Amino acid sequence: MQQLNFLDLLAQLGINGAQIAAIVGSIIGRMAGVGSELATHNWLRKQSALGELLVVDYESLPLMTMYRAADALWKHSARIEQTLIHAYYRFVWFFDPPLPCMISPIPIFEGEVPHNTKARRGRSKEKRTDCPLVTLGLVLDVSGFCAPFSDLCR
């Protein structure tokens, strides 16, 4: 988190100290496989020594702070994702994120949908030509991560 300046990013987004502590606890709790905000809150208070390591008093942290922290993460998710992707590439690969490099089209829907303008007749892997298909594509970057939709519009 320090190497990617994650805590600084949260502060720049206007997230307060208690919510930042809750976000860090929540992320580490999810990595440990704890689960929901409620389960993570209980884990941080009763089973984890994370508060001692980070010098945060998780025992007095209200449960509502965990929920508000999750809301703050969701509210700023696009900016956080974009900033962390750029920081990851600069830290690991020493360059800015490249353009998406691989498109894997998959015919996914078959059937009759008279008002769907995106469905066209084509070939499916089952070799069906009796109905329109809608094809979805998975766009990946050079390291195999799914490219954010905003990268496709550059």
Image: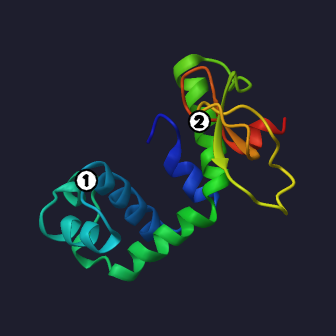
The three-letter amino acid code for the residue at tag 1 is Gly
The tag earlier along the polypeptide, 2 or 1, is 1
Q: Residue furthest left?
A: 47
The quarter of the image holding the N terminus is top left
Q: Tell me the quarter of the picture where residue 13 sits.
A: bottom right
Q: Percent x, y for residue 20? A: 45, 62
Q: In whole angstroms, how far apart are the C-alphas of marks 2 and 1?
A: 23 Å
Residue position for label 2: 146
- Front-most of residues 131 and 140: 131
Q: Tell me the quarter of the picture where residue 42 sits.
A: bottom left
Residue position for label 1: 33
- Front-most of residues 150 and 7: 150
With respect to residue 30, does 124 lie above or below?
A: above
Count neighbours of disc 1 (C-alpha within 10 A) and say few if under 14, some if 14 to 19, many if 20 or more: few
Q: Residue at x 67, y 37 (%)?
A: 128
- Per the rendering, the mark at residue 3 is none
Q: Residue at x 64, y 31 (%)?
A: 127
State yes or no: discs 2 and 1 in contact (Cβ < 8 Å).
no
Viewer can see residue 14: no
Left or right: where does residue 73 sit relative to residue 61? right
Q: Is label 2 in a helix, a strand or a loop?
A: loop
Q: Percent x, y for residue 30? A: 32, 55
The three-letter amino acid code for the residue at tag 2 is Cys
Q: Percent x, y for residue 92? A: 52, 21
Viewer can see residue 133: yes
Q: Tell me the quarter of the picture where residue 55 sits.
A: bottom left
Nearer the observer, disc 2 or disc 1?
2
Q: Percent x, y for residue 10? A: 56, 56
Q: Is label 1 in a helix, a strand or a loop?
A: loop
- Front-most of residues 149 and 53: 149
Left or right: where does residue 33 sit relative to residue 133? left
